């Protein structure tokens, strides 16, 4: 691709913002622990407010904890309507990388800076948004902020979600000075947002393999989380004969292998990545193993077949060991096909870069949740190793600058031209 982007301007705006947040929530592993409504998350929220204030953008925290920074056209009267909205999230998975989420926020403020330097006067409102609890690392359900705003997630269920320490979302919100009773759908969302464009690091190696720094999204695979609760009988690890044991760990271990085998057979993915063991003693046979399955596939029938097969075989394993199993869906997100209209407008705005790759992703995003309510699109930035949800997650500085500059070009075209 030819480099006709404002790389220098993007670097000048992007790099100081990026440096400001690099140490927030960083753990000894080198990764980040920016869980929703934790101290690092609250620190980043204040940083967001500071970024908005420095740009004379009005900040709104909506009823679900999502942050909006507004740039209204000169002379605009009344509530924002038909806005160009961009952004992402600030929270992380346990020991996650620096780029997943914050790259989209920093790039959004960078794009605003570039438009100001260019002297652009927007004809429609512009907003930078940070959605709350996208990763679901603390309370187990992903995209809580956007799911609440679109009415996908019931507020009562959300408030009852608990973290590993037994703290409910309602309690966490109260401790953070928020009012849990306010949670619920945002009736103005469809009117306020004309389009939501989310810039995100690619979580995979598609761009690296074709040697391209940027891509547009075609779709998001259907995916979900299921809790597998294996129960047995605690006993002494040394004094209990093997034939007398009711060990739920055996069925769980078999289920882990089953998930990998069945996913491979269906060209899908399935992962048991979170496990809680009781009583969790070295010399004790477990009484309970709680494990969470993350499963994803290219289409809904394949996903359903995959989870059904894993569940059925897990029940077979538990019966063979004299243990029991309960499987509970936590969240299920159907396939998202991003609409052609917004993606084509992005492609036209970036036509000076040549033809951009259009790729699907197996990772969930707030853009996918909002797609049921408002037009959405995604712009991916190359990840040279494909590693994500890890301290090793990486994007080259030049590609980050390209992404932010490209977002500015899209923003300029969108807010200064008609939809035709």
Image (cartoon, rainbow, N blue to C red):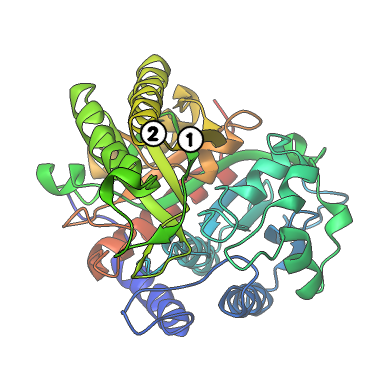
What residue appears at the point 48 percent right and 64 percent down from the top-left corner? 279
Observer-nearest residue: 293 or 185? 293
> Judging from the image, what secondary structure is the residue with disc 1 in?
strand
Q: Quadrant of residue 345?
A: top left
Whether residue 342 is situated above or below residue 159 in the rendered picture: above
Q: Is residue 413 visible?
A: yes
User: With 363 as the anchor, is 81 left or right in this view?
Assistant: right
**Which mark is first along the chain, 1 or 2?**
2
Whether residue 420 is situated above or below residue 143 in the rendered picture: above
Q: Residues within 10 Å of mark 2 (few under 14, many from 20)?
A: many
Q: Tell me whether the residue at label 2 lies in contact with that at label 1, contact meaning CB atoms closer than 8 angstroms.
A: yes
Residue holding disc 2: 318
User: With 83 as the anchor, is 214 left or right in this view?
Assistant: left
> Judging from the image, what secondary structure is the residue with disc 2 in?
helix
Position of residue 409 measured from the top left corner of the image (x, y, whole percent): 42, 51
Label drawn at residue 379: none
């Amino acid at each position: 691709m030819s480099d006709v982007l404002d790389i220098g301007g993007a670097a000048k705006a992007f790099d100081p913002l990026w440096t400001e947040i690099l140490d927030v929530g960083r753990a000894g592993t080198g990764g980040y622990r920016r869980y929703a409504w934790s101290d690092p998350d609250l620190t980043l929220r204040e940083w967001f407010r500071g970024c908005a204030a420095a740009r004379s953008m009005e900040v709104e925290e909506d009823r679900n904890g999502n942050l909006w920074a507004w740039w209204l056209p000169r002379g605009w009267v009344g509530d924002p309507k038909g806005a160009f909205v961009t952004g992402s999230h600030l929270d992380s998975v346990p020991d996650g990388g620096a780029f997943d989420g914050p790259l989209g926020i920093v790039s959004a403020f960078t794009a605003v800076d570039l438009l100001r330097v260019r002297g652009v006067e927007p004809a429609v409102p512009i907003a930078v948004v940070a959605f709350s609890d996208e990763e679901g690392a603390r309370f187990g359900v992903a995209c809580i902020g956007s799911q609440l705003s679109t009415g996908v997630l019931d507020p009562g269920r959300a408030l009852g979600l608990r973290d590993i320490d037994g703290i409910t979302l309602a309690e966490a919100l109260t401790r953070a000075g928020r009012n849990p009773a306010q949670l619920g759908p945002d009736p103005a969302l469809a009117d306020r947002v004309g389009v939501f464009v989310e810039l995100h690091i690619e979580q995979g190696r598609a761009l690296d393999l074709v040697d391209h720094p940027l891509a547009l999204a075609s779709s998001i695979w259907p995916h979900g989380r299921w809790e597998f609760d294996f129960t047995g009988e605690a006993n002494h690890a040394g004094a209990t004969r093997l034939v007398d044991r009711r060990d739920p760990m055996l069925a769980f271990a078999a289920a882990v292998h089953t998930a990998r085998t069945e996913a491979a057979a269906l060209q899908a993915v399935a992962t048991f990545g979170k496990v809680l063991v009781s009583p969790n003693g070295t010399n004790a046979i477990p009484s309970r193993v709680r494990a969470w399955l993350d499963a994803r596939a290219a289409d809904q029938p394949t996903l359903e077949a995959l989870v059904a097969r894993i569940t059925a075989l897990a029940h077979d394993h538990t019966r063979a060991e004299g243990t029991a199993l309960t499987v509970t869906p936590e969240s299920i997100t159907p396939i998202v096909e991003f609409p052609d209209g917004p993606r084509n407008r992005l492609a036209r705005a970036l036509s000076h870069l040549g033809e951009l790759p259009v790729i699907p992703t197996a990772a969930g995003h707030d853009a996918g949740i909002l797609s049921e309510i408002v037009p959405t699109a995604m712009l991916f930035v190359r990840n040279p190793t494909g590693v994500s949800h890890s301290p090793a997650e990486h994007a080259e500085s030049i590609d980050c600058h390209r992404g932010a500059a490209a977002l500015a070009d899209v923003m300029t075209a969108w807010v200064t031209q008609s939809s035709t």
